[in-house]
Image (tube, rainbow, N blue to C red):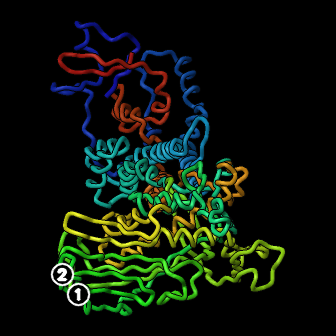
């Protein structure tokens, strides 16, 4: 309770005799009145306020009093807007606008690259929009809850503690939870309290709307090139008075690498390429390549142990067993002794082959015991295998990619049927083996595409195969191994026999005739690389002159993914807040309650100047700006008095 005084607060000796609002442990002053809950409670507050008369004890002149009343009657524009809930409505509208703007921004960038704005990021924009939206709707809810407390007390007599509950609810989530618990769904204000509590998740939910994921896009400023040719007719210099030619040294080096270089990255199989972005892709490409096909010919082995070791040799009189294919590829052994030629490899003429009689290049045959181990005695008669392989020129269609600097291919189609130029009486073209796949652009073929393996290259590869792929692993004694070859001075046949019998060829972890299939597939890949790199090698490794296939360089870019379910909570907070505000406006008008909201001033005018009348003067509450107040102690009581 407040006493208006026209003088300064009394000094220590006088304070006990002054009229004021006392708060403390002492007895109330003689101006305290008991307020009965009678029939007058059904009157509106606005009617009650008209009963209050000016207090003549203020000692003001009539002219000053009238002037002050005139000033109180002129409400400010702000007060007028406040009485009509203009600020709260505008705040709710602004909150909705920010929420809609947030949704529009997210929808615009959903599934698109992360924007690269100069001074702000997408997360910052979303954070600002959500913060403004939340602040505006919480302001409206807070004012609505503050107004609803007057509606609550205008309906009927309520516990005084409810005043504190409503006041706390308008300030934070703890008070809102207390309000919901206190009212137990008996008042519209619980929806506002629920909005305040749910608003705690407003910012986290809006931040969870945005998710970034990497995506690759084409970058025209980067380079993507891949070696590719449609013809190959490269060979070394002639020999034997031009009757033969040496192999292309590049092809020889690649084949040697595929057999003797145990590198699991297989550099001898990867064609030359350039991908400056580390991620590239190409449309379907058709290229001249080679492939290895193999077949088991174990069933064609002819084994004989009829002959005996001559008397003048070690193991005289022992059976001398031979294992032979129809082409005369032969292995031999003395049963269960440390002397044998257990591994035999030979390149044969196509008409001598068991399976590949129409091969372009010499088929390769191999005889070997199963699970070969050179440190043990020779195997018995029933543990032998034979394999025949053919390396053939082909046209292969494939799609190539580079991902994180790792090159890879996927085969789309293979064409094997070829013809020699002489078969069609072509005289104005290079002689060789030609291929014309009936494909379209979907497999990398243009209408004028043609593929050719030249006769010089075929001649050089044939001589290379006949020399390299021929020999035997010969165990003379347990401590003496010989790699027997036909022409040890040409190429590296003894090295090849050693690799096939004792070495570890890349990807060929087997000890049987099946090792030939693995080795020939490596050779075919090395030959394919040589064919495709020939233009690049011929251009002295100059990408601009190598006529390479152009692809697309890809760059990893962060893309935006919007997880729309997270928008539910912010939207729900706004709906609850807007609904609370609309209900507050309707209930306030229906109950004709003054628009005091969270204003504490009306509470201070419940009793003043010793008046016997109850109620709050609307003019006094609205004109509180004219009063000066001070808190001081009076006889162990705290006093808030006007000065």
**Compared to 610, does 355 lie above or below?**
below
Q: Mark 1 and 2 residues: CB-CB less than 8 Å, in contact?
A: yes
Residue drawn at (33%, 63%) of the image: 503
Which one is nearer the viewer's eye here, 627 or 50? 627
In the figure, residue 515 lies in which quadrant? bottom left
**Compared to 591, does 63 lie above or below?**
above
**Compared to 154, does 566 lie above or below?**
below
For label 2, the residue is 316
Residue 630 lies, in percent from the top left, at 35, 17
Earlier sequence position, callout 1 versus callout 2: 1
Q: Residue 402: in sight, yes or no?
A: yes
For label 1, the residue is 308
Placement of the C terminus among the 4 image quadrants: top left
- What secondary structure is marked by label 2? loop
Residue drawn at (32%, 69%) of the image: 501
Which one is nearer the viewer's eye here, 370 or 246? 246
Residue placed furthest toward the front: 312
Mark 1 residue crowding within 10 angstroms, few (<14) / some (14–19) / many (20+): some
- What secondary structure is marked by label 1? strand
Q: CA–CA distance between discs 1 and 2?
A: 7 Å
Mark 2 residue crowding within 10 angstroms, few (<14) / some (14–19) / many (20+): few
Residue 71 lies, in percent from the top left, at 57, 25
Which one is nearer the viewer's eye here, 377 or 150? 377
Residue 147 appears left or right of 287: left
Residue drawn at (66%, 69%) of the image: 243
Residue 310 lies, in percent from the top left, at 23, 82
Which one is nearer the viewer's eye here, 239 or 618? 239
Residue 619 lies, in percent from the top left, at 49, 33
């Amino acid at each position: 309770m407040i006493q208006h005084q026209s003088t300064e607060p009394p000094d220590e000796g006088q304070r006990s005799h002054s009229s004021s609002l006392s708060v403390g442990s002492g007895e109330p002053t003689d101006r305290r009145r008991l307020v009965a809950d009678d029939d007058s409670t059904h009157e509106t507050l606005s009617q009650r306020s008209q009963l209050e008369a000016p207090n003549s004890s203020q000692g003001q002149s009539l002219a000053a009093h009238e002037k002050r009343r005139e000033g109180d009657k002129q409400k400010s524009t702000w007060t007028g807007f406040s009485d009509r809930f203009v600020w709260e409505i505008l705040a709710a509208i602004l909150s909705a606008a920010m929420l809609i703007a947030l949704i529009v921004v997210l929808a615009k960038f959903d599934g698109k690259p992360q924007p690269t704005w100069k001074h702000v990021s997408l997360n910052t924009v979303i954070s600002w929009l959500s913060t403004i939206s939340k602040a505006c709707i919480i302001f409206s809810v807070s004012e609505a809850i503050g107004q609803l407390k007057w509606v609550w007390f205008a309906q009927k007599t309520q516990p005084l503690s409810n005043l504190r509950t409503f006041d706390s609810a308008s300030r934070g989530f703890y008070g809102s939870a207390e309000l919901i618990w206190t009212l137990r769904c008996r008042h519209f204000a619980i929806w506002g309290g629920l909005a305040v509590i749910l608003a705690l998740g407003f910012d986290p939910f809006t931040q969870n709307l945005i998710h970034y994921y990497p995506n690759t896009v084409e970058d025209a400023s980067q380079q993507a090139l891949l070696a590719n040719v449609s013809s190959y007719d490269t060979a070394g210099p002639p020999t034997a008075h031009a009757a033969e030619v040496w192999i292309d040294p590049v092809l020889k080096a690649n084949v040697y690498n595929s057999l003797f270089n145990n590198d699991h990255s297989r550099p001898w199989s990867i064609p030359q390429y350039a991908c400056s972005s580390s991620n590239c892709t190409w449309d379907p490409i058709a290229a001249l390549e080679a492939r290895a096909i193999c077949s088991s010919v174990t069933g064609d082995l002819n084994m004989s142990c009829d002959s005996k070791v001559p008397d003048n040799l070690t193991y005289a009189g022992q059976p001398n067993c031979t294992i032979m294919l129809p082409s005369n590829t032969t292995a031999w052994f003395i049963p269960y002794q440390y002397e044998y030629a257990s591994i035999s490899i030979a390149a044969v003429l196509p008409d001598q082959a068991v399976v590949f009689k129409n091969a372009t290049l010499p088929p390769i045959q191999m005889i070997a015991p199963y699970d070969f181990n050179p440190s043990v005695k020779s195997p018995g008669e029933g543990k032998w295998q034979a394999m025949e392989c053919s390396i053939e020129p082909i046209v292969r269609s494939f799609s190539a990619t580079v991902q994180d600097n790792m090159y890879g291919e996927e085969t789309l189609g293979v064409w094997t049927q070829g013809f020699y130029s002489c078969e069609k009486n072509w005289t104005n073209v290079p002689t060789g083996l030609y291929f014309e796949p009936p494909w379209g652009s979907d497999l990398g073929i243009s209408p004028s595409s043609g593929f050719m393996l030249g006769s010089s290259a075929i001649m050089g590869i044939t001589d290379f195969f006949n020399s390299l792929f021929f020999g035997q692993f010969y165990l003379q004694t347990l401590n003496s191994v010989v790699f027997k070859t036909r022409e040890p001075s040409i190429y590296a046949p003894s090295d090849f026999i050693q690799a096939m019998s004792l070495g570890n060829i890349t990807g060929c972890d087997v000890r049987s005739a099946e090792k030939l299939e693995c080795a020939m597939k490596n050779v075919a890949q090395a030959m394919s690389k040589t064919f495709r790199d020939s233009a690049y090698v011929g251009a002295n490794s100059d990408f601009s002159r190598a006529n390479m296939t152009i692809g697309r360089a890809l760059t990893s870019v962060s893309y935006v993914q919007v997880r729309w379910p997270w928008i539910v909570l912010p939207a729900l907070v706004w709906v609850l807040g807007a609904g609370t505000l609309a209900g507050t406006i309707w209930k306030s008008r229906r109950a004709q309650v003054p628009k005091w909201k969270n204003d504490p001033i009306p509470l201070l005018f419940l009793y003043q100047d010793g008046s016997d009348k109850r109620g709050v003067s609307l003019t006094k509450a609205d004109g509180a700006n004219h009063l000066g107040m001070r808190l001081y102690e009076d006889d162990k009581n705290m006093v808030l008095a006007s000065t």
